[in-house]
Amino acid sequence: MISRSTRIPYGRCTPVSRVTVKIVSYDDGTAPLMGSQMMYDQVMGSTSGQELIGGRPVSSVSDTNISHTFTVVGLRFNMPIPAAPTGKSVTVEATFVPTTVGTFTWQCYAPCGAGINGMGGAMSTMKWMEGKIKVTA
Ligand SMILES: [Cu+2]
């Protein structure tokens, strides 16, 4: 028996809520993925298996056109974010249904920061290319 006060910090939950992530990016720079992060050019974990870029459904973004990723490894969710046209923005949307409760880290896996390996600047500045998502039952 589970009482009302029972809290399960990490574990499965009944998938009841749809979450839509909408990202508007003004970054026209690209940051091609490297090594084990190459798989993050694919949309993962969305309800349709796709994301909408400017309203157009896609299942991946060309590695040479990736600017950032919105990746939540703990929820198996990934949105590749393409470079925006210079002077304009790009809007990317995807919907997913979390089936696990807990606090999860989202982060960008594209080497979009400064320096030779792209891991400086924004990538090494706390809360710029990473954050937390809290899923409650
Ligand atoms: Cu980034």
Image (cartoon, rainbow, N blue to C red):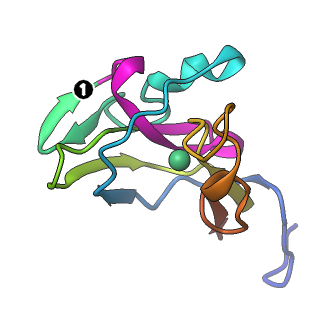
Q: Specify whether residue 65 is painted magenta.
A: yes
- Residue 6 falls in image quadrant: bottom right
Compared with 39, 47 (above or below) is below
Residue 47 as seen in the image, left or right of residue 44: left
Residue 60 showing in the rendered view: no
Q: What residue is disc 1 on?
A: 58
Please provide percent x and percent y for residue 64: 38, 19
- Residue under the point 73% across and 67% down: 126
Residue 73 or residue 102, whichever sits in front:
73
Compared with 56, 72 (above or below) is below
Residue furthest front as drawn: 116
- Residue under the point 73% across and 56% down: 124
Please provide percent x and percent y for residue 1: 88, 67
**Numbered range of the magenta stretch:** 59-80
- Residue 109 falls in image quadrant: top right
Disc 1 is placed on an element classified as strand
Q: Is mark 1 within 8 Å of ligand 1?
A: no
Please provide percent x and percent y for residue 123: 66, 52
Residue 83 or residue 72, whichever sits in front:
83
Q: Specify whether residue 29 is painted magenta.
A: no
